[in-house]
Amino acid sequence: MNSPALATDQTSPLNLDRFPRVAMCHQPTAIEAMPRLSAHLGGPELYIKRDDCTGLATGGNKTRKLEFLVGDALAKGADVLVTQGAVQSNHVRQTAAAAAKFGLKCHALLERRVPGTDESYETTGNVFLDRMFGTTIEFRPAGLDMNAEAKAATQKLKEAGHSPYFIPGGGSNEIGALGYAVCAEEIHTQSTDFDWIVLATGSTGTQAGLVSGLHALGNTTPVLGVSVRQPEDIQIKAVHALGQSTADKLGAPALPVKKVLVDDNYVGEGYGIPASSTLEALALAATWEGLLLDPVYSAKGFAGLVGGVRGGKFTEGEKVLFIHTGGSAALFAYEQQLAAVM
Ligand SMILES: *Cc1c(COP(=O)(O)O)cnc(C)c1O
């Protein structure tokens, strides 16, 4: 534990300050009511936890993960962070900013994962911000094992005399997931009144950290991950695997697989392609609550919230907490598509 800016959270019930960590996140993030949207939809009381306001390069869920990942990188003497994501990755943008903040270099591999995008998709939104933070970028075609590609790039940097630190896509390993064990502690302290917690799930670290953290705290609030990409069965297995290894790291009891709930009804045609329910969710959040979602992640998650109210999964008298994981920087890469329907 020799990094220069360690967070000292002496009140952590999960004793999370035993892990290397830097302080970056504006936390605890606020929980706000959404009274106008709740009245409009009818049924449960809807709340939102503002993890879009975590304070690193327009915010988002990767800030919490990066507190532990950068802490670990500094403890290991790294001088460059290597990571990967889709072209409009929020994770890469936030990793790039964290690297700049701690005097590290950043090298990113961007997968051309989304079909049918225009030229500006690779220069605007998050890519524009990546470059602003001085990150070096390599593009890759869709369908490769991107973590293997990034590991190979890490090895190359090592051979060239650097001290690279590999961060998997989305910052999703048991180190990054600790950031969402912190979020679990926050929610547990802020209110035990929620009947449901709902969020978007992609590379799994957010849901895995949240579920393992709540489990370690003995908090039984169900957490529903709304998939942005993969079918339910595959996503449940992936979240559970990382949730279990995170629970192990926390010294918590085994994580029952039934604690991992996923809904894949809002994916649409695939990752990064907004479905009609995604566009409706963007518009509902904007016009009823003045909230900015993003078309890749948080609006698909929010569509799951809205669909759950309409379908009777969440009912009158219940309180439902949506975790806003951020992503609005990607809006500008979707301006043409969105302007056509807003
Ligand atoms: C990465 C991301 C998610 C998904 O989190 P995972 O830990 O990858 O499952 C959700 N929302 C936004 C805005 C993201 O950038």
Image: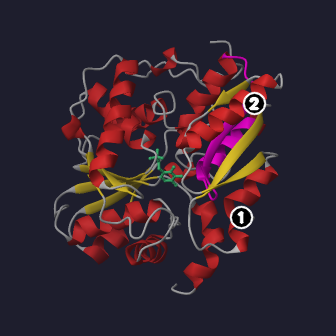
For the point 56% across and 79% down, the residue is 338
Of residues 142 and 31, the one drawn nearer to the viewer in this rendering: 142
Which residue in the structure is indicated by mark 2?
156
x and y, in percent, of residue 234 in the image: 32, 47
Of residues 26 and 331, the one drawn nearer to the viewer in this rendering: 331
Judge left or right: residue 305 versus residue 145: left
Q: Residues within 10 Å of mark 1 (few under 14, many from 20)?
A: some
x and y, in percent, of residue 227 in the image: 37, 56
Which residue in the structure is indicated by mark 1?
122
For the point 23% across and 73% down, the residue is 42
* Magenta stretch bounds: 76-99
Q: Secondary structure at mark 2?
A: helix
Q: Secondary structure at mark 1?
A: helix
- Quarter of the view holding residue 280: bottom left
Residue 93 belongs to the span the image colors magenta: yes
For the point 28% across and 74% down, the residue is 41
* The N terminus: image quadrant: top right
Of residues 166 and 54, the one drawn nearer to the viewer in this rendering: 166
Residue 337 belongs to the span the image colors magenta: no
Q: Amino acid at mark 1?
A: Glu
- Quarter of the view holding residue 230: bottom left
x and y, in percent, of residue 15 in the image: 43, 18
